Amino acid sequence: MRYPPATSRAILGTGVAVFIIGLLSYQHSFGTGNSLSSTPTFSKNTICYVWHGQQLYQELYDDFEEATESLSVGYANTLGNPRRCLRGSSRLYQHQITPGHNWSELEWGFIQRQCVASEHKLLASEDDPHQIWRRPAKPQTVQTSSGKRTVIVLRTWDDYEYTEKRLAWLRTLIAEVSLQRPGKYQVFFLVNVKDPNIQLEEDDDAYEQALRQFVPEEFRDMALLFNERTLKAWYPLVPEHGAQDQMYQALQIFSQKFQQYDYIWQLEMDLRFTSHIHDTLQSATAFARAQRRRNLWERNGRFYIPHLYNTFENFSAAVDAEFGETGIWGPVATSDFIPKGPQPEKRANAGWGIGEEADLISFMPMIDPIGTNWVYEDGIHNFEDGSDTPRRVAIVSITRSSRRLLQLVSDAQLARGQWLVSEATLETFALLHGLKAVTVPHPILFSKETRMEDLLADINKGPPHSKAGGDSPSMLYTKNGFLPGPWWEASYWFTGNGAAKLWDEYVNGRQLPPMLLHPVKEK
């Protein structure tokens, strides 16, 4: 697969500069409660460019009718307008190296800081992120987030292969979230250095050498290095520090060091978006903000299936009718600590939570691991209630978390050595502290050969509070290994090849609604 060639553009001068130009930016507007509206609203914003004389970024959309007919799971509107397709080639070709546009010579971190400085009236010459990352963290107390600043953290490794296709995607991501719609997001890389013997904190030369060896020059001023030695120094009471079991420890440290960010999106390098990334994340955030607390955990525990409910409003009403006033309300009981979430309102206030920012946003159901035969079902450590501790787990650690939630996890690991594996960490702490957590029911495609009856029997078989769970659901890796099911060809899962096939088709012209595709291992 090759991306279409980039068209040449006129260049005035040879230097690189940052230009800030007025633009109308597209945003989604969601209604209150569980009622959603796809009517777009527009607000004045700015756009940043890096090349002298560069034309406007091209966002080429097509209207199409295919949209939701082939969707098996998910609410099509959660990530944007499902009848509007952003052309894949129009996004990627703009960020390939061409005569006069050598992207590898840029410093993406500096460019982002220039843009955010203009939007927030900050000093562009703020401290070097590397200095902030490597200096001791300032003490902080658990606090409610202001919701003003959000950061995107891309998780990568020292041996990640930065091919031309991957570089074009990374430039597209940075441009879409921080240049085309500046002011809301900044992007960082968290680079996992696999050699635990490198003294990244103490040895300036070793850190600089590793940075040059493992990160392309254009991303170095936005890349932060860590290894297991870093994590062990922070959390000595937790015996596991590998990415599989502790995907959030480095993020916890990041939230302590960069306290100006209230929320952190953790994205993976093999995640792809079929729509404008800024607008997609904003739509997911707006959906989560619009959700009320009543029976929220019960909705989180199951897939939204259009075949059964037709609308998300019908789905919410069905869950309310099933649970009435018996659903989770505030924190669940625990012997381990005093919950730090907001004081629950009276149950008579059925709208509690509407307009409240979510401390946790996930893209898969948050299910009860007990009774699932999941390989990590018994993986809870140093909690007083042991395996009886109420828990939740969501497969794929692509999330938005609040600094408050990350700090609560950090405190528990540091003071008491309490830990769970990555997919259960944020979900369980949100449940125990009574924080707002939302599963965004984004559209997921399955193979055309999947029968609806078989799909329902596989993904909708659990107990009422955890319908997507139950005994040995095929979306989990169980104690008996992988089980037969529809997930190998799904557009969003933790493995399989369905996402990669769809991405290849999308880049080569297939029209798709706003979707998340994972994993995509293209080179």
Image (spheres, helix red, strand yellow):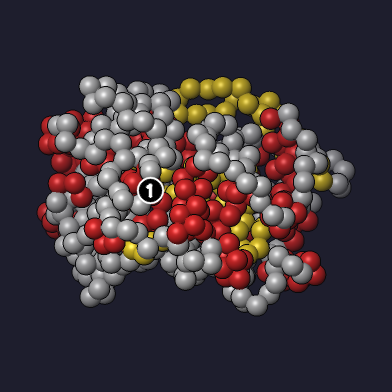
Which residue is located at x 22 percent, y 22 percent?
348
Residue 322 image offset from top left, x and y in percent: 12, 36
Amino acid identity at mark 1: Phe
Residue 425 showing in the rendered view: yes
Residue 478 pos. (x, y %): 25, 70
**Residue at 52% in and 36% down:** 143
Question: Which residue, given by chain and number where applicable, does mark 1 sit on?
Answer: 337
Say which quarter of the image contains residue 213: bottom right
Q: Is residue 357 above or below residue 455?
A: above
Which of 12/422 is in front? Answer: 422
371 or 483, which is in the foreground?
Answer: 371
Residue 367 at x, y percent in the picture: 26, 52
54 lies left or right of 137: right
Residue 220 appears left or right of 383: right
Q: Is residue 252 above or below residue 63?
A: below
Q: Nearer the viewer, residue 233 or 224?
A: 233
